[in-house]
Amino acid sequence: MPDLLIELFSEEIPARMQGKARDDLRKLVTDGLVEAGLTYASAGAFSTPRRLVLSVEGLTAESRAVREERKGPSVSAPAQAVEGFLRSTGLTLDQLERRADKKGETFYAVVEKPGRQAAEIVAEVLEGVIRNFPWPKSMRWGSGSLRWVRPLQSIICLLSDETGAHVVPLEVDGIKAGNTTEGHRFMGNGRFVVTGFDDYAVKLKRAKVVLDTAEREAAIWQGAQNLAFASGMEVVADPGLLTEVAGLVEWPVPLMGRIADQFLGLPPEVLQTSMKEHQKFFSVKNPKTGRIEGFVTVANIEAADGGEVILKGNQKVLAARLSDAKFFWENDLRVAKSGMGEWVEGLNAVTFHNKLGSQAERIERIAALAREIAPLVGADAGEAERAARLAKLDLRSSMVGEFPELQGVMGRYYALEAGEKPAVADAARDHWRPKGESDSVPTEPVSVAVALADKIDTLTGFWAIDEKPTGSKDPFALRRAALGVIRLVLSRDVRMSMTDAKGPVGKARDQIGIQETKSGPSWADVNDLLSFFHDRLKVYLKDQGVRHDVIDACLAMPGNDDLTLLVKRATALSETLKTEDGANLLQGFKRANNILSQAEAKDGVEYSFGAELKFAETEEERALFAALDKAEATITPAMAQEDFGTAMAAMAALRGPIDAFFTAVQVNSDNQIVRRNRLNLLHRIRAVCSGVADLTRIEG
């Protein structure tokens, strides 16, 4: 079985595109080969800044012959039907077979496709992949029609087996496939011949190219750590930057430099962001001082002087960048120390949304809402309102204008410089969180109050103007905002209704200027926003191991607009159903509910009159009466106290008496009085269990 090696050699591929390009190349080629009738053992894709590579092992030498039969129209069918069948099969009338069946004679087409050599199939598939490769951005060059991310220079397409290596005949836009490539742009020794993937990888490394991205990442990280350790320093981990830098170099050579003393007073986040965004440097921290005092840059060449000239050049450029950052920092500090009034005025000129007003107007809404929420999360109302008024002022700062990703972080520094309390300053940094699923939620009460106010104002505002997420489109990140509200509420056990007109959501809606009508809010029904929260909650709880049907069973209960209450109920029910008693009780409940529902439909009456013990004929019936009395005595006060665990446990304890009842008793007795009493007893089972959750929505 031959092995296949493909290399697409070009000018530098942007680092951010390489990962997806590897995956696309592997999938498109292997899918094409399989669709054409070939099989393979394994496939691996690789990339460097100048090449995409695919290695396919254990490829079959040729596709199998295929014999396909297709049933056509009746021999007596109209000519148009026969002609259509001929066109679809590519055959002529005399090539069709006639076969008799019960309805008469029918045309059949027998199409035989002979096996094809792997080289022929590979050439066909690869040309299609190259011409239709899904680059996010591509370009044309010269007089050709081919589009590629950067000018494509050469192609390796090689099938190798025990007889040797064979170039697959292929030409794309004047570029003929061959068996040669080249190594490092500066340290390589020209083009060289390869005979297969193993030979290719070895020769590339000799030519100063590390093919595997993971190997380049490991070399960069290990080299950076060694340099930092030798100076008593630590490299600040940044997986995203590591992946990006590995996509910029073919032969990584880490070099470490120092930051000039004049810049060490800048906040560490500023140093780290400036070096990462502008220079692709790793930050190096002094563990004794906690300051960023150095950097690691990764060269793509082994310099004769050990990288001294490279470092000097990088330090010169870095000094210019940090000089700008220092200017921004000092200018912003001047504004902060004067009370930040300049930024307050500036936000009047910043439009949040043309239908929702300016940032200044939005801040007023958030401040009032934060004051309302503060008691619910244990925060001081005055501090929460003050924090909300200051939280977004750094949007007008020079530093955030240059580095938007520092919003919030810089706000905290400026608030502290303005003499604000630490809790107020921390809210400027933390009210943006959580920014995603992996981000932590703020824990300080003032920060939680401002974060909730910010996100609730965003959601109610965009709901009010009917700018809701649709399908995969969510331009205002409303799904993320809703999930943020859920996580914040649950982290603090916040008790608030998401539909109460006097609650935070109602206040937020009123502040936007939406007026109530006799039929309710004039904007989209408030329950629509609640449903949106419920959908996000389902996703969140599913990740926590709570099944969707369990959540549905709890959503059907009163109080589903209180997210904390809802989650407590769903968690308790989920844990109960994981027990043997809980699972068996569910089956007993469904049996009782099914029998009762059928009887009520047949008799045209709801059996809710109350069962009487005096009509019980068996010990199992009497035991079930006693068990239901005991369960109700526990469940009713437990539910009133929102002690769902106790209520669920009491409900699960009914499993034994219910099982014994159905084993010993025939519900549909010939005695109509006994039958009705037993049906009323089943109604009591349904009522007791339904007071905890709607078990009819549970699957299984």
Image (cartoon, grey):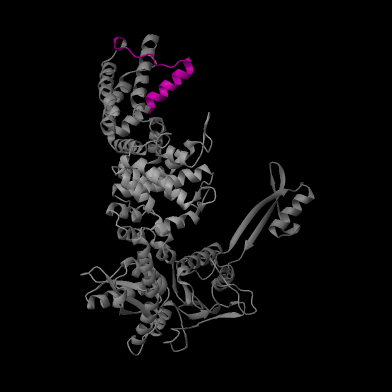
**Nearer-the-camera pick, 694 or 302:** 302
Residue 661 percent across, percent down from the top left: 30, 21
Q: Residue at x 34, y 26 (%)?
A: 689
Q: Residue at x 71, y 41 (%)?
A: 103
> Residue 199 magenta-drawn?
no
* Furthest residue toward front: 338
Residue 160 seen anywhere in this rendered image of the structure: yes
**Nearer-the-camera pick, 132 or 564:** 564
* Furthest residue toward left: 288
Q: Magenta part of the protein: which range? A: 590-614
Residue 658 percent across, percent down from the top left: 30, 24
Q: Residue at x 38, y 9 (%)?
A: 673
Residue 406 percent across, percent down from the top left: 38, 62
Residue 484 percent across, percent down from the top left: 38, 48
Residue 223 seen anywhere in this rendered image of the structure: no
**Nearer-the-camera pick, 322 or 148:** 322
Q: Quadrant of residue 578?
A: top left
